[in-house]
Amino acid sequence: MQGYILKITPTKNEDLILKILTPQSLDTFYRFYGARHSTIGLGYKIDFEYKINPHFLPQPRNILHLSHIWEKKYERMYIWQRFIQLLERHLNEIYEIEEFYYKLLESSALKLVLQNPKRVLLESYALLLAHEGRLRLDSKCFVCEEELDSQISLGRAFLLAHPKCVHSKTYAKTTILEFLQNANTFEFEDSQIDCLWDILCLGL
Ligand SMILES: [Zn+2]
């Protein structure tokens, strides 16, 4: 089976607890430290088998790292791993893991070969918000619930607000709506992408 490593927790004797997202599930595995093992890392895509242990966590076997060409680029990998950490935390609160999340990582990983990593993952996040029915495109500020103007600011999860209500950077409302509705960051300058990325890092 194939999956993405969303979390690695070291435990006794260099054993590891792994959380792996597959198309069907987000499961926890126990990996004993042994002489023969492949290198694993946060955010890696792997192929693996597993052995069920009736008294403990299942054990992954024959792990094969299905590496992406961009993993050797430090900044790209760093941004990917940041998104993976945020996704892991987010999925902790989700009851049922749908294939959507695995597919989202698959399509994001493909785009990372060529495109700006923050843009790729911001667009992935807009797709996630839409999938979960959390796109708030109404014309009211999430803080004071009064009507918004043409210039807006953003809170966590890209909720729209008056600049005076959240005291942060301002954007044209039409540009933000275009981004959220179409999962496209084309209209933003790179400096704006950095600011939007910081908002994403507040939590998915
Ligand atoms: Zn307001």
Image: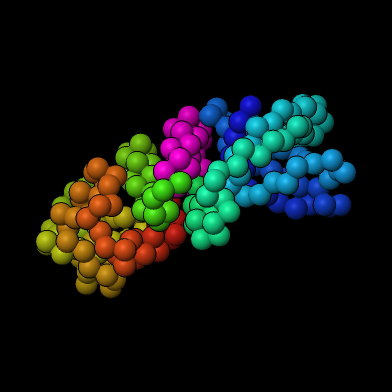
Q: Is residue 18 left or right of residue 171?
A: right
Specify start and end residues of the magenta stretch as a single range: 89-112
Asked if residue 41 shows in the view, the reply is yes
Q: Position of residue 16 (x, y in %)?
A: 76, 47
Q: Nearer the viewer, residue 146 or 112?
A: 112
Q: Position of residue 161 (x, y in %)?
A: 23, 61
Asked if residue 145 shows in the view, the reply is no
Question: Residue, x 20% and y 50% (percent of image)?
Answer: 177
101 vs 71: above or below: above
Q: Position of residue 3 (x, y in %)?
A: 60, 35
Q: Nearer the viewer, residue 173 or 48?
A: 48
User: How is the protein colored in the picture?
Assistant: rainbow
Question: Residue, x 66% and y 49% (percent of image)?
Answer: 41
Q: Is residue 183 left or right of residue 121?
A: left
Q: Nearer the viewer, residue 25 or 166?
A: 25
- Magenta portion: prevailing SS class: helix
Question: Residue, x 55% and y 60% (percent of image)?
Answer: 74
- In magenta segment, residue 188: no
Question: Residue, x 41% and y 48% (percent of image)?
Answer: 114
- In magenta segment, residue 93: yes
| Total numbered labels placed on residues in the image | 0
Quadrant of the drawing holding the N terminus: top right
Q: Position of residue 48 (x, y in %)?
A: 69, 31
164 vs 26: above or below: below
